[in-house]
Image: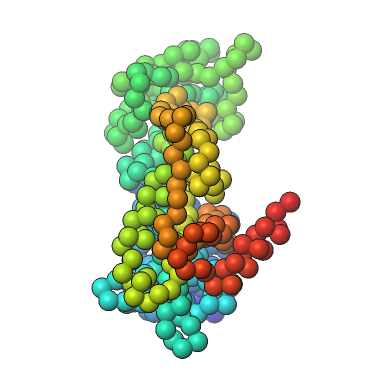
Amino acid sequence: MEQRLRFGPEFVKEHRRRFGDRPRSGRQLTYDIAVDDEYAPWRAWLGEQLDLLAAKQAEEFGRKLWLDESHWPCVFELAAGAALRGAGFTAVYEGEHGRLTPDWSVLGADGKPAMFVEVHTDQPARQTFGQIRGWHYLDQLIRKIPVGVVLAMAARGNVPPQPPEAGIAKRIARDLRVRLLASPVPPAVIDTHGYRFTVVGDRFGPLRSANGLCAQFASPSGIAGPVDARRLAAAVDAKVKKYADVIDAHDVPFVVAVGAHPFTGLELTNVDHLLAGEQVMTFQFNPGDWHIGSYQVDLAHPFRWTMPARLSGLLWMSNTFPFSVGGVRLNAEASRGVPQALVDLRVSEEQSEP
């Protein structure tokens, strides 16, 4: 069927041809999703969703879908539409209402708007993608060194480390190769081009690399730091303000479907803590991270987010395939309640909990 061919074998072949020979610093982080067999169900699902849109809309999605900065916003917009249709709604993508085009307009039996659904993706800072690509490239070079040790970057100062440019990364890898091969016993510390690497070990000696006889780099993740739902809450407030006149003019519920890029570490529990005014600090980091930033709190006056009256509720979209609704949070103080089908989604969610 045509929808399964949109990102089928021909797409994979062409994507590999265009980007497969580039170093990891020079291609999108979505490359694996676009070509690996394990993501074939993802690609089939994405193709199916695009085939439900108008041709021009599908073409626009196709341009943005494989770019790091817009991949997850595209996925969540499509997932929100799939959830609405799955709940029995008739949903129109980017229908025009004056000068505004809400992501999804739910239509009633009379063809008039019965609910508006906007989609928001909590994203990491834009520079994060380039940093991760840079660390991946250096990792790609280090794993070619035929010495089975684990390397990590030593702490230097109180600022997060930045990945080296491609040319410097090549020189670093050459220096590391020479130093590691120069002696039967690898040096504990190697300084090169402004970076300090340590050979990770314990009292029994250097740790064994997961790459067998080749080196392993426990690189900084590029995503280490506090996990905070306040940014998402501010974005939802901004959407309510933007669509206030449209909501009031049609006198219909307004729902925001929210999801988090995996790099942010944000989960529904973080949003729940914010709604309850519970001061819970969460950090994410990997073994290669030595700088995870800071988080200021006022224990006497914890921040609490109150949903605006025009916001009928939130849909939490899962960032794991098949990207279903992972939770529904209704606003008890909303001016307009949501349709029963969304209430039923919350009931189903609660019944599925252990």
Q: Is residue 298 above or below residue 79?
A: above
The percent position of residue 149, horizontal first and vertical second, equals 54, 23
Q: What's the residue at 46%, 29% (across, down)?
A: 300
In the rendered structure, the answer to whether residue 329 lies left or right of residue 125 reads right
Q: Is residue 32 visible?
A: yes
Q: Is residue 271 above or below residue 202?
A: below
Q: What's the residue at 31%, 36% (across, down)?
A: 166
The residue lying furthest to the right in this view is 354
In the rendered structure, the answer to whether residue 40 lies left or right of residue 303 reads right
Answer with the quarter of the image where residue 86 lies: bottom right
Which of these two is toward me, 149 or 161?
A: 161
Q: What's the residue at 59%, 67% (across, down)?
A: 343
Which of these two is toward me, 113 or 87?
A: 113
The percent position of residue 56, horizontal first and vertical second, equals 34, 77
The percent position of residue 215, horizontal first and vertical second, equals 51, 28
Color theme of the render: rainbow
Q: What's the residue at 61%, 62% (across, down)?
A: 346
The residue lying furthest to the left in this view is 99
Which of these two is toward me, 92 or 185?
A: 92
The percent position of residue 57, horizontal first and vertical second, equals 36, 74
Q: Is residue 153 above or below residue 7?
A: above
In the rendered structure, the answer to whether residue 196 lies left or right of residue 87 reads left
The N terminus: image quadrant: bottom right
